[in-house]
Image: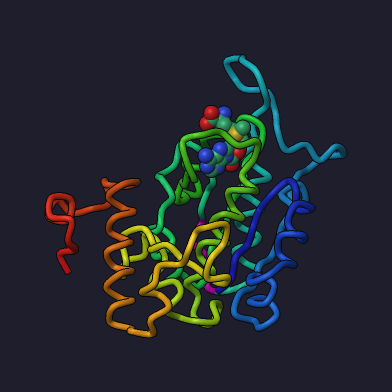
Amino acid sequence: MRFDVLTLFPEMFPGYLSQSLLNLAIERELVDVQIHNIRDWAKGKHKNVDDRPFGGGPGMVLSPEPVVECVEAVQQMDSPPGRVVMLTPGGRQFGQRVVEEYSHEERLLLLCGRYEGFDQRVVDILQPDELSIGDFVLNGGEVAAMVVIDAVVRLVPGVLGDEQSNKQDSFSSENRLLEFAQYTRPREYRGHAVPEVLLSGNHPEIAEWRKQNSLERTRQRRSDLLTSEEDKSGNSTD
Ligand code: SAM
């Protein structure tokens, strides 16, 4: 899968891309991430990419020309053209269903804003998928783009060592609930013991414990994820 990130701060990405699972996925050519500096498409001696808002008010707005021309040029760099995702607090809410949807794309272009955001004509012309990672305002779209890449690559086949891992993850289509509590060695730490059943080697009992634990944690923390039947009975409907 290929990601193209369009940003005014390309220097923010090398550290992130060179670590852990993502670095491995890139080395194994399962994932390709290309970073493009929007300023390279700015015209004039000063390569300005922003200007004051019409109508007045604080801050600067990203001008339409360098952004639209950067997206068009990046689309031409490879085929197929990518789905254009604009990171913006006004977009539809990111979540695991969107992660799953994006994981089926061959290519995504992630458009990172800065300052007061994009001139509306960028949206009108490119008609991107406008995406928000939550109801808060970041300084720029770069961290949001990293969030999208990080979540989507987990679903690219071959990226995780064990394919079961993303199936049991919280919010996945297969699981839907919060994941059960996890334990590793030591068996006891500061008076807190690992539940006996997990040491038993009895796999049906372990599976049942995990199912109930997952349900209980979801009921306590995120009851909005439960079906009304699960909520009432305390038992999973499947
Ligand atoms: N004035 C804008 C508003 O109130 O909607 C906020 C602009 S913000 C300071 C600059 C850029 O950060 C945005 O263009 C966007 O790319 C990114 N950004 C900020 N918050 C975000 C969020 N919750 N989700 C996705 N991107 C976000």
Q: How is the image coloured?
A: rainbow
**Residue 166 at least partly seen:** yes
Residue 83, magenta (yes or no): yes
Identify the image quadrant of the N terminus.
bottom right
Residue 112: percent from left, percent from top: 62, 47
User: Residue 205 appears in which quarter of the rendering?
Assistant: bottom left
Would residue 28 be counted in the magenta stretch?
no
Q: Which residue is drawn at 71% across and 60% down?
A: 16
Q: Please give the name of the residue rendered at 57% of the width and 70% of the height, measured from the top-left corner.
A: 186
Highlighted magenta segment, given as a residue range: 80-84
Q: Is residue 49 above or below residue 39?
A: above
Viewer-closest of 44 and 185: 185
Name of the residue lying farthest toward the front = 191
Which image quarter is the C terminus in?
bottom left
Residue at 47% from the left image edge and 47% from the top image edge: 131
Give 34 or 199, whichever is nearer the viewer. Answer: 199
The picture quadrant where one finds residue 149 is bottom right
Residue 168 image position (x, y, % from top left): 39, 70
Residue 129 shown left or right of residue 17 in the figure: left
How would you classify the magenta stretch by its main secondary structure?
loop
Residue 142 horizontal side relative to residue 196, left or right: right
Q: Relative to 150, is 58 above or below?
A: above
Q: Residue 174, percent across and down? A: 31, 70
